[in-house]
Image (cartoon, rainbow, N blue to C red):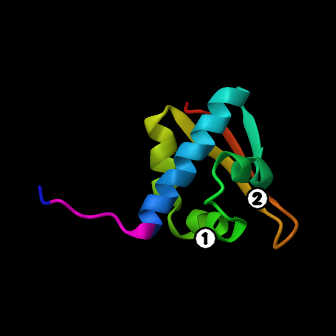
Amino acid sequence: MAFKPKSAAETKARDLGLALARIAEEAGMPANIGVDRLRRASPRLTPLAVGQMVRRERDTVEATLAERGLALVDYSDQGPGRGMEFVIDAAA
């Protein structure tokens, strides 16, 4: 199998998935994670980048969570300045 380098977007989506997994594991399940809490855990993940990663690389985020036995149950984005929220739970 040939090595395929990851794009910057894939790498950032994986970072998002790992940050969500760490927070959810610390908080207990199901975990409701807002963008402010996510930013404290990983300052590189700006709200704009988070929104883009969920829209463009959702499969990568979900695969990263699945590796840790977690699942993205819900994601809501109320628009700029209003906030985002993720709901993470143990995979069924």
69, above or below 49, in the image? above
Q: Secondary structure beneath disc 1? A: helix
Mark 2 vs 1, N-terminal side: 1
Is residue 57 shown in magenta? Answer: no
Residue 64 location in percent, x, y?
46, 46
Residue 85 location in percent, x, y?
77, 53
Identified by mark 1, the residue type is Gln
Q: Point out the image quarter for the N terminus.
A: bottom left
Residue that lies at the very extreme toward the right in this rendered image: 82
- Specify the segment rendered in magenta: 3-8
Query: Which quadrant of the structure image shows residue 45?
Result: bottom right
Q: How many marks?
A: 2
Answer few, some or many: residues within 10 Å of disc 1's Cα (few below 14, many 20 plus, some between 14 and 19).
some
Answer few, some or many: residues within 10 Å of disc 2's Cα (few below 14, many 20 plus, some between 14 and 19).
few
> Which mark, by number, is residue 52?
1
Residue at x-position 60% and y-position 63% = 54
Is residue 5 shown in magenta? Answer: yes
Q: Mark 2 points at which residue?
A: 76
Along the viewing direction, whichever of 50 and 91 lies nearer the viewer: 50
Residue 31 in sight from this viewpoint: yes
Q: Point out the image quarter for the C terminus.
A: top right
Residue at x-position 63% and y-position 29% = 25
Residue 31 location in percent, x, y?
73, 36
Residue at x-position 55% and y-position 33% = 91
Identified by mark 2, the residue type is Ser
